Amino acid sequence: MYSSTGEELVVTAVQNSPLTSDEVLRFVARLQSSDFDVDAAAGIDVISALETAKCACVATQAVMTDAVATAISNERRELGRPKAQWRNGIASQIGLARRESPNRGGTHLGLARALVHEMPHTLARLRAGELNEWRVMILARETACLTVDDRRTIDERLCADPATLAGAGDRTIEGRARALANELDAASQVKRRAKAYAARRTSTRPAPESMGFFTVLTSMEKMVCMWATLRRDADTIINAGGDTRTRDQIMADLVFERVTGASVAQRPPVTVDIVISDSTLFAGGDTSAYMHGYGDIPSDVARQLIRDTLDNETHVALRRLYAHPTSGALTAVESTSRAFPTALGRLIDLRDRTCRTPWCDAPIRHHDHIRPHSAGGRTSAENGAGLCAACNYAKEGEGWTAEALRDKRNARHRYRLISPTGHTYDSSAPPMQVVELYNSRIENVMITGLFDDDAA
């Protein structure tokens, strides 16, 4: 790395003592208080130096991640725990520390172990700021199906000399790593394809203007077959005449019809939950509605969806959800059963929306007792939380605890997750978009008084 004057910028080690969080935070504080009144050339130098710092931070995170995982595993082994439990919940702890999901935590944990134990030259290039995190991830991904010896060979051939990948972009690095992998182990390509096919799935994500993407990840030949079939059938409809839709519109409608078994005009034959205030639904209010599994939608879109459903004689059911008028907290529902009843589970789904573990956002799969049922925890909305499977299994692991929090009367549902290392993470349910306040202060006070301490 060179400055604007042509001088090489050299990074030198200051000390060899263990890194502490206080040191890191002091550096962060220095960055936060920096003055950015510099000329363009000096600014480019700072940007380049910060990129090197980012890469060095990623490398340090990787080494620290592996060290934490090793320490936890060793402690469990020394305590005589079964080998299958040595690494339980570690990915969740890493994800929480990085403010990411357990799935991403597992990815970072796997990358850290590969860099520290199998790819030392790649780790060195990352530390020096010559490779960024994404390019290191590419190298790890392209060598994942190889033996440890073959992976180390590629690591040495590509990263031992900094000049080998100097100036190389993402595609170049990916291509060179894949070519070497095929050279060392031709069967690795077959393994990669089998691994990729095992990951086939469907997924959804929101799009602008109340639209959404429905994605299918499958093998190339199946994808081509599905696309060709949709295009053929769309062309048949167009050639028959009388249809004003475009080919793309017809293909999208055909996907809906073949997945649900219903025509586009009939609307979905399964339950679609829309949470909307009474004033928005019946009096034309502007408060946004919430579609479970999608997110917030404009009030006029929600009303139109309901009108279309009624016009097509589809069954519509209204469920009353009582929310506190200022906090948006749902009222509590309690059961004597250990398992969460269907109605209570649905209330938790609508309240929490996605997995309640901070930064996870995965779909809810389990209704979990915050305080375990075996320890006297009630089956109630207050003692319940919607979690994904991974977060629920991690929470049940050794050393994890959780507790419901009630900071004040009628506050939104909150609970605290405590990891085996003693770190705490608080989770708050999102506010319900159904709160309609009255113009009169007296009316507000009277309405608020109707809600007692059982609000969830």
Image: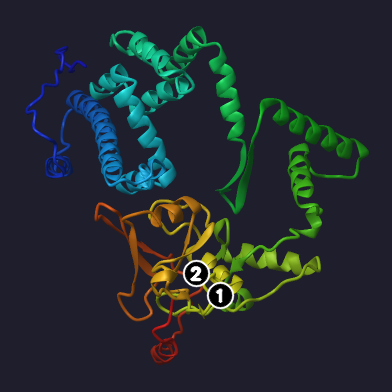
The x and y percentages for residue 356 are 43, 59
Q: Is residue 388 above or below residue 168?
A: below
Element class at badge 2: loop
> Closer to the camera, 6 or 57?
57
> Closer to the camera, 360 or 439?
360
The quarter of the image holding the C terminus is: bottom left
Bin the neighbour count of mark 1 within 10 Å (Cα to Cα): few under 14, some 14-19, many 20 and up.
many
x 28%, y 8%: residue: 161
**Residue at the limit of the structure toward the right, as seen here:** 240
**Residue at the limit of the structure toward the front, as seen here:** 80
Residue 277's disc is 1
User: What's the residue type where badge 2 is placed?
Assistant: Gln
The x and y percentages for residue 259 are 75, 48
Element class at badge 1: loop
Bin the neighbour count of mark 2 within 10 Å (Cα to Cα): few under 14, some 14-19, many 20 and up.
some
Q: Are marks 1 and 2 in contact (CB under 8 Å)?
A: yes
The x and y percentages for residue 170 are 43, 20
x 17%, y 28%: residue: 39
Q: Is residue 277 above or below residue 49?
A: below
| Residue 168 visible within the image | no
Which residue in the structure is indicated by mark 2?
Answer: 433
